[in-house]
Amino acid sequence: MRKVGRAAQARECARRLAVGGSPSEETEALEERLRQLSGQASSPSLHHHRSRRWLCRLAAVVLTWLTILHLGACAGPDDLRKAMLGLPAHPSAAELAVSIAASTPFHRRVALVTGATSGVGLETAGALAEAGFNVLMGARSPKAAAEALTAVQERARKRGRGGTAELLDLDLSDLKSVARAARSVGGSALHVLICSAGVMPSPLGAEYSETSDGIETVWGVNHLGHFALANALRPALRRAAREGFPARLVLVTSEHGHRYFAADGLPPILPPSSEGWNAFAAYGVSKLSNVLHASEAAERWWAADGVAAFAVHPGIVGTALGQMRQASSASAPPSALQALHNFGVWLWWHVIAWPVAERVESGAASVVFAALSPSLAGLKFAYVKHCQRAQPAAAALDASAAAFLWAESERLVRQGRVHGK
Ligand SMILES: NC(=O)c1ccc[n+]([C@@H]2O[C@H](COP(=O)([O-])OP(=O)(O)OC[C@H]3O[C@@H](n4cnc5c(N)ncnc54)[C@H](OP(=O)(O)O)[C@@H]3O)[C@@H](O)[C@H]2O)c1
């Protein structure tokens, strides 16, 4: 009733204005009233119009998504990804490793892979075992380690190229554990060291934390633990190089992490402090450190030992990265919040990001490429992605930042030893 009354008033105003006359106060008042009335009278229909527009947009997004999922199901995710993102197609990690092994036998060669219980590390370990390597699988959680070992051994046995696998107890958040792991490799030659283990805290609810050595956790695990491990294993890599094998240190980094999340470069003080800490920046700095670590190791080890160092981005791969984890010692099941969060991460990888995410076999192929490809022979340093050489961010090629990182990392590892932590 009220609305009809207002509409009738608006019509009357419009009629009186249309009849005309010279602009007067009355005309202006009428015009103002007409504006108010028409605004009020049309607001419900405006609301309808707006919500219809939003519904149409939502329907378009859902339809596009369903079409992408359907195309993915028909053409296969790899072909779809290639078509959508213009990425090069390449073989899986195992196909690549086995094809290289056809011309360079890897039987009795030793590869150590960290993070070998999950995702890219597990797939890389399996591919190397299929190619004939004796794979040392760095792992911190006994249950995950036992399952991963069985899977990798099974792959080695099926392929029949003499590959083997064994576990190496390694917790990168504890420098004592790192030193023990390196000692247990002993005096034997190590042909390839692949540092794949990594943590990426979720931006939802992640808080600053420290390793048992008092180092910020993300940088401590992703960079410092690997730095200590690689340095302790340098003599073993040197031995392999002196036997004539192109020994390599391979650090798994992240294209987006090192390029975008660490846009300000390394923080002036290492390890990163709790002040202003945020999950993405912490991950970015650790991944930038991986590339700088590789470039500085190449400077120091190539001429002296014949050991090359490469950094590799595995692609965007649907793994357990980003999930909330229990500490290695904790045997309790995840809390309800952690379980919910991890389900969200799973949903992200397997439903939302699925059409653009790489399969783990494809992501690990870039790691295998960095570790074994003869096309990288003679290079002391390279940044690899999508199974080819690429250009890292400018900050990752900063020689003074690399030297600063090396010196600070050495100091922190030494300090950890001195304090017997
Ligand atoms: N997935 C991607 O899209 C992506 C993109 C760019 C770069 N990357 C890089 O790829 C690498 C592998 O990640 P992913 O995707 O395979 O993740 P993932 O499935 O979560 O695997 C991470 C591995 O690291 C191990 N790890 C974590 N903390 C450790 C510690 N303190 N000591 C020893 N091992 C530890 C985990 O062992 P537990 O099983 O015991 O937890 C697990 O085996 C990481 O360096 C990551 O930064 C991944």
Image: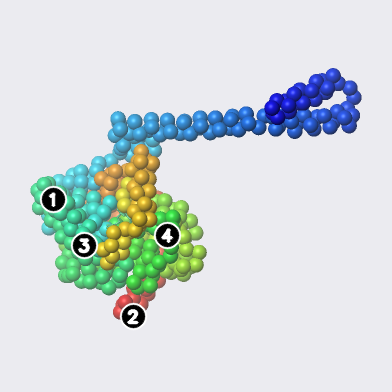
Question: Crowdedness of circle 2 by 10 Å Cα count: few (<14), some, many (20+)?
Answer: few
**Res. 206 mark:** 4
**Ligand 1 quarter of the rendering:** bottom left
First-in-chain label (4 vs 3) = 3
Residues 135 and 188: in front is 135
Q: Which of the two discs, 3 and 2, sits closer to the camera?
A: 3
State yes or no: Cβ of the residue under disc 2 lies below 8 Å from any atom of ligand 1: no
Instruction: List the residue tagged with mark 1.
Output: 154
Amino acid type for the residue under numbered disc 1 = Glu
Labels 1 and 4 touching (C-beta < 8 A) = no
**From the viewer's perspective, is 9 left or right of 312?**
right
Residue pictured at 73% horizontal, 28% vertical: 6
Alpha carbons under labels 2 and 1: distance apart: 42 Å
How far apart are the alpha carbons under marks 3 and 1?
A: 18 Å
Closer mark to the observer between disc 2 and disc 4 = 4
Camera-side residue of 179 and 278: 278
